[in-house]
Each structure stands twice: as structure tokens, then as C-alpha cells.
Image (cartoon, grey):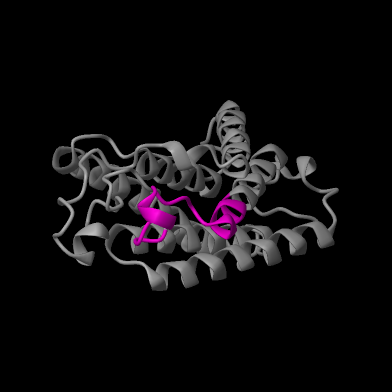
Amino acid sequence: MAMTVLAGAGHGAHTAALPDWVRVGFAVVLAGVAVVHLRHGAQMSRQRRWWHAGHAVMALGMAAMYLLPRMHYEGLHRSGLVLFALLAAATAVAALGLRSREGALNPVWTMSALDYLAMTYMLADPAVRPGWLAYVFAAYFGCAALGWVARAFDRLPVFAHPVAAAGAGAGAAAGVGGGTATGGPALLSAHPAGGPGGAPARSRMSVALTLAAMAAAMAFMLVAM
């Protein structure tokens, strides 16, 4: 069955030649991404848990888009459109709210808002979405995939405020800010306890690779649309 996931009658020619094994392969990989993030999220708390849960939802949404043609599951695609539009809006509002509390716009939540916005675009009716925007999003996801593979995002300052001074207890070291005992920044995917010797934690390799895989899958679908 040719992939008509997000294509209307006038757009199907761009994806008609995509083999079934490619669609299924992407879906299996994305299902694995969802499992990894659900497992990591279960070990986290507060913002980190929501961040992992959001990526699990995106991965499952992408898997469904690869497997379920729009022409046969129009209602499902419309529901997904509403879901990801709401997630994009809620994440943008939350990022602005956290900015006032933490003193800086969190780049991780900014990226999540863009990811949800891209999902909204892909689920929108092909007749109303501008075609050029697909290539803008595809370029963004291509850069994101390379960034996750290179671990470039490990160096982004996720939180501006350091944690409480040493001696405040282990809870402070893994507090709301998500920093380490030395006050250094850490990704939401990093373990709350920080790295060896109290060094700023790095995102786990499994998280970085799954995010790279999902970004590549999203870029591929945007180009194939």
C-alpha cells in the first residue's frame, strides 16, 4: 500500500513509490523511541518527566502517520491535529512562564514547541498548508538530528538559576531547576544526580540517539509529503 499518510489526492504522487517496508521500518523505530522516553520519563520528575512524555507522544503520533493513511483515517488525523496544536500552544505558554521564573527562555522547551508545531503542520489538510514551510521544518529537523548525534545540545544552558548552595541536601541538587550540585546547566534528559564528581550531567546516549532518529523520521516525512 502506497503511503498517503498526509497527502491528499493532489499530493499522493510524491509518496506513491515509498515501499511498505520503509513505512513499517520507520514506525517500528518510532515505537522504540516512544518506549525509551517513557522509561526515562518514569525515572524523572517535574519538567523532565513532561519533556520525555511529550517526545513519547510525538513518536507515537509519527508512527501512526506512517502506518495509517489519511484517506482511511481522516478522523484520527483531525484528532491528532487538535492534540498537537494544543500541545504547541501549551508548551509555548509554559516556556514563557518558566522564563519569568528561571530568568531565561529554556531552549529545550522552545524546541519542543517547534516540534509540536511541525506535527500540527503535518496533520493539517494539505489544501491549507503552505508547501514551502515543509522544507523549512525539514531543514530544522535535519539540523536537530545532527545536533543530537554530535551531542551539541548538551552544552545548552537549560536553566539560568543555579540550585541551592551545597549542604541544602540531595533534594536541592536535583531540584526544580534541574542543575547539578555545582550549579551547572543540565539537559532535561540528564540524570538529576548529575555527572561523576558533581560535573554537569550530559544527556544519556539512548536519549540523544532516539531524538536524532525521530528528527530524521520527521524530516523524511516532510520532504516526502
Is 147 drawn above or below residue 187 in the view shown?
above
Quarter where residue 216 is shown: top right
Relative to the observer, which residue lies in front, 151 or 2? 151
Q: Is residue 189 visible?
A: no
Q: Is residue 42 visible?
A: yes
Residue 52 belongs to magenta span:
no
The percent position of residue 168, horizontal first and vertical second, equals 13, 60
Relative to the observer, which residue lies in front, 99 or 25? 99
The percent position of residue 183, horizontal first and vertical second, equals 26, 45
Residue 209 belongs to magenta span:
yes
Quadrant in the picture for the N terminus? bottom right
Please report the residue visible at 20 percent of the width from the left and 41 percent of the height from the top. Answer: 161
Q: Which residues are magenta?
A: 191-211
Relative to the observer, which residue lies in front, 66 or 168? 168
Quarter where residue 170 is shown: bottom left
Q: Count every numbered label the image shows and give the total.
A: 0
The percent position of residue 149, horizontal first and vertical second, equals 63, 44
Q: Quick check: 10 left or right of 36?
A: right
Quadrant in the picture for the C terminus? top right
Q: Quick check: 131 left or right of 162?
A: right
The percent position of residue 191, horizontal first and vertical second, equals 40, 61
Q: Quick check: 33 left or right of 85?
A: right
Is 64 drawn above or below residue 16 in the view shown?
below
Please report the residue visible at 70 percent of the width from the left and 45 percent of the height from the top. Answer: 9
